[in-house]
Amino acid sequence: MTATQERPSDEVEKEIGRDRRRKEDQRLITGRTRWTDNITLPGMLHLAMVRSPFAHARIVSIDTSAAKQATNVVDVLTGADLGEALGVNINAWPITPDQVTPTHSPMPSDRVAFAGEIVAVVVARSAAEARDAAELVDVEYDELPAALDLKESAADAVLAHPDLGTNKSAYWVFDSGEAGTGGSVEDAIAKARTDGIVIEREYRQQRLIPAFMEPRSVVVDPTGEQLTMWSATQIPHILRFALAATTGVPESKIRVIAPDVGGGFGGKLQTTPEEWITWAVARRLGKPAKYTETRSESLMSGHHGRDQWQKLTLAAEKDGTVTGFKVDLLADLGAYVSLVGGGVPVLGAFMFNSIYKFPAYRFAVQTVLTNKTWTDAYRGAGRPEATYAIERIMDELAVEVGVDPLEIREKNWIKHEEFPFTTVAGLEYDSGNYEAATARAKEMLGYDELRAEQRRRRESGDPVQLGIGVSTFTEMCGLAPSRVLGSLDYGAGGWEHASVRMLATGKVEVVTGASAHGQGHETAFSQIVADRLGVAFEDVEVLHGDTQVAPKGLDTYGSRSLVVGGEALVRAADKVIEKAKPIAAHLLEASVDDLEFSGGRFSVRGTDQGMAIGEVALATFAAHNLPDGVEASIDADATFDPEAFNFPHGNIINPLIVSGQVHGGLVQGIAQALWEEAVYDDSGTLVSGSFVDYLLPTAADTISFEIDHTTSPATTNTLGTKGVGEAGTIASTPAVVNAVVDAVRHLGVNDIQMPCTPERVWRAINSAGSGGSTEGAAMPHFESGGEMGNQEQPGTSSTEGAGA
Amino acid sequence: MIPAQFDYLAPTSVEDALAALSEHGDDAKIIAGGQSLLPVLRMRLNAPEMIIDLGRIESLRGVRDDGDAIVIGAMTPHAVVGSDPLVGEHAGLITKAVEHLADAQIRHRGTFGGALAHADPAGDLGAPALALGAEFVIQGPGGTRRVAADDFFVDLFETAIGEDEILTEVRVPKHTGWGSHYEKFVRVAHQWPIVAVAATVRVEGGTIAEARVGLTNMGSTPLRARGVEEALVGQPATEDAVRAAAERAAEGTNPPSDLNGDADYRRHLATVITRRAVLAAAGA
Ligand SMILES: Cc1cc2nc3c(=O)[nH]c(=O)nc-3n(C[C@H](O)[C@H](O)[C@H](O)COP(=O)(O)OP(=O)(O)OC[C@H]3O[C@@H](n4cnc5c(N)ncnc54)[C@H](O)[C@@H]3O)c2cc1C
């Protein structure tokens, strides 16, 4: 065995921290890759769905005879035809034991509960023929009254599911007094009413639509020993589990592949009726089948996000020290309780206190069923809503106290020397330095100069007024730990799995259970392993998204891949080194204790003897000369389950990817503030059903960003990383709305409902300026039962979103 | 989405295209750039059995000088119109309108004639055509006729073009030396205008000698803001004078109410945007 000379480790450039271009981008951008819709199997059939145009209707009859006669149509099937084989779509997170959960058939045969629900499926030899024949399916409906407005539905005015007797699904409460994490919020409010400040507001989180670039697509091949499903999903592992649990196929007979997936933002964190129907059809006909949704279908029936009314009461002392915060939410579930749906507001429950240290807090959410598209996670899931509420109302408090919005925040936030800090919501924040981050942001922005300019413009009555908005925030990210998720009755754990396989040629295969859909895992994970094992970045191959290759995992969402999956990877890599060490020692004829590992090389301390890990891999592969009793493999697996959530920002593996995540997140958050809104009409039809009416920003609409990170390495994982995938989205929304309101506050405006359209701004200015009954203007010392905020009430305006 | 099945013809002369139109009657539809027709087909709002493509008829492309008018072929893509020097010199208003019409990809596919024939009240070319007093050259089985802009736009998606006719070219009277501006109000960049105003003015020694103002999306067809035009003539090209004239922008309009704005908001927008457009056109 030869002992090689290698470069000293300090000369090897570290991969972690490098601006690596993403190795996966070439194939993703050119589309020359395995998108699900690119997959074509021999004899494959194509599906087209027949969908209800009504929000709520009884299905009287379905006549499929004409469609069955159409060219190259193989079959037309309804829910009744498929029966039990259809399975059900499940809710994995009942947030209370008594949650009211309607049964969700992928294709109901008696009653439809939202416009876009599937009532029949056409199977043909080509997608075009399937679509043509779908027009020929004749469905007779008996229209029922629809529960559309969130507030009215919460009062059970019209029932979304008459058999359930109520629209109220679950009522979930966190009370710091009861939990022992703080005082009673009612006491705090009562005290503030006598000698402090009480601010009451009602804010609307409009309904949003996750609009990923690749529409959902699913292919099922029933012809092998294992049934295979390819799906454009974020969650191949959870999908496999759910298929097994609800369709009677043993898990061992199911292989799920999420090939390259083009974006998700939470929208592909779902098990969908379309997947279940394609599964059932392929099994019934014994042929591969494909369904790819159109963009219109995606907007109409893929799950939506947000959609809440937030009723807020903030109590403070006269100097602006917050003493309590009470949050009452109504959350629109849509027609069914989706995979995680009811839990989304609960994910926000621990974040309404954000970075502040007030002593009393109460959160209550009522989830409500309506006859609209179901809702579930959308980038940030619960936490943007929480941050919006606290950061908007902090601005109102600043106005009331008469100080700068940053000053009121500083007065209330956790000081850097106070970490670790257990919040009033019971979470332990490991680290943070809000003073430093804010000072840096002020300096970069030229905050004081901008405020001075704002004053000048106010005084001169300039027609162009300046609005300055700030938002601090934190989020719990790295969705994990299992123990906490279990205590919340979440249906799965929060661990992640990784394997490192050392190939004979010195190349490395890394298998992760965190299945990427555009985040750049292949690049970031390669960087981590390259450093850890001292191999070249190019020599690391990251495999994921196939239950046959990566059998264990909990997939990608909630900013968890790097902080949980990355840590599992580090641990697997460390095990590889541990396993390789005795073999290296044996080959180098040295004692294990005399070996050290650095820069990819085992060396005998005090000598120039050593060998690279790739050489150990080759020797292990040959297995000609291994120490006695040592396994002929240096591959390793690891499963990691953190002890706590973590809070951004930590150490950075790849600054370019982090910038990309932050930029994209910022734009998505700004889009909620200014542009996006899912709007239904009075009959429950989605009016914003195409990108002509659902306004997504493009590069032409956005601004350039300057980002700066003040990092506080996480203490919960080896790499010190924290989640960043959702960060930008969460903070930018309240910052922008705060800026819009700040620009016109001198005209008597204290709120503008999202999205802050030019028309809404105009109306806010006019009603305030005309001195009429401006709702909620300057009424911070709130008498109970008074008006709240400036926003239109649902049901009274045609432009009000999902509430109308 | 996938359109319903159709047959396809690509004639190389206007005569052949007209013959095909006559033969297939109601079942036929002309395709120019397809930027409006294809979405209609894909969303299955219409399912013609025969598509007649004008793309191979060379005579319908290009811009030429014809004395006191410039002539724009119906099949000239927006991008070509937008960068054409003759258009820029004699009908600058069109150049300005094309600049912000849709996005670059659509400007390379969509055509001048297709957009006008489509007659979307939110389309960006109707108001400039109206303001410039364009003439529409329409060919049918019985020959060629010219229709004035005032008579061309009939209603929402309806023009003077008969079912068996083809728009071949648009004649735009030269407005050499006129200042012009197209002001488009949108929420996101790639959107059709919520309201837009096309203004072109001839300023003589600081006084507005002539003015033409067209409104986009303030009714079921593009409209002339005649009240504003009258009020501008003889006025100095100043902020105050223009502001006063622009107050009349919403006169006689019937704007829609939709997700992008209620009618009353659009009326308000029309006055503000008219002021901005006229001031920019007058170089004030
Ligand atoms: C995403 C998107 C954004 C857009 N944004 C804008 C915008 O901001 N502003 C704007 O003005 N437009 C916009 N458009 C429309 C664009 O300008 C189209 O190009 C135009 O409306 C139609 O032109 P076309 O050549 O593509 O016509 P086609 O789509 O081919 O045809 C449109 C209609 O006109 C008929 N037709 C076409 N040519 C003739 C002819 N010579 N004689 C008789 N009938 C004819 C066709 O039969 C059809 O009914 C947008 C389009 C898209 C897809």
Image (cartoon, rainbow, N blue to C red):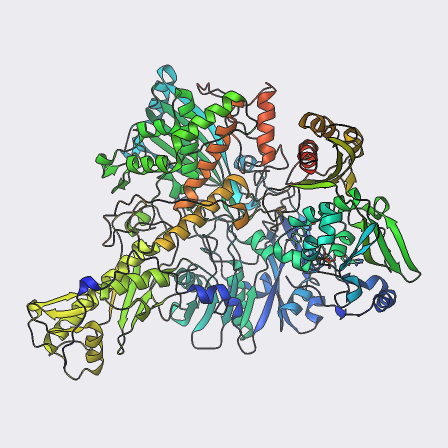
- Compared across the picture, whether A175 is left or right of A47 comes to left
Q: Residue at x 38, y 55 (%)?
A: A657
For this orientation, the residue located farthest to the bottom is A624
Q: Residue at x 23, y 54 (%)?
A: A718
Q: Residue at x 46, y 18 (%)?
A: A783
Is B209 rendered above or below residue A77? above
Using the image as rendered, state which of residue A190 and residue A461 is in the foreground.
A461
Using the image as rendered, state which of residue A470 and residue A702 is in the foreground.
A702
In x, y percent, where is residue A101? 47, 48
For this orientation, the residue located farthest to the right is B142
Is A112 rendered above or below residue A540? above
Q: Quadrant of the N terminus of chain B?
A: bottom right
Q: Residue at x 39, y 29 (%)?
A: A448
Residue A406 in view, yes or no: yes
For this orientation, the residue located farthest to the top is A194
Quadrant containing ligand 1 reads bottom right
Question: Image quadrant of residue A285?
Answer: bottom right
Is A685 rendered above or below residue A439? below
Residue A776 in view, yes or no: no
Q: Quadrant of the C terminus of chain B?
A: top right
- Compared across the picture, whether A250 is left or right of B208 comes to left
Is A397 rendered above or below residue A637? above
In x, y percent, where is residue B128? 75, 45
- Compared across the picture, whether A603 is left or right of A687 comes to left
Question: Image quadrant of residue B109?
Answer: bottom right
In x, y percent, where is residue A478? 33, 50
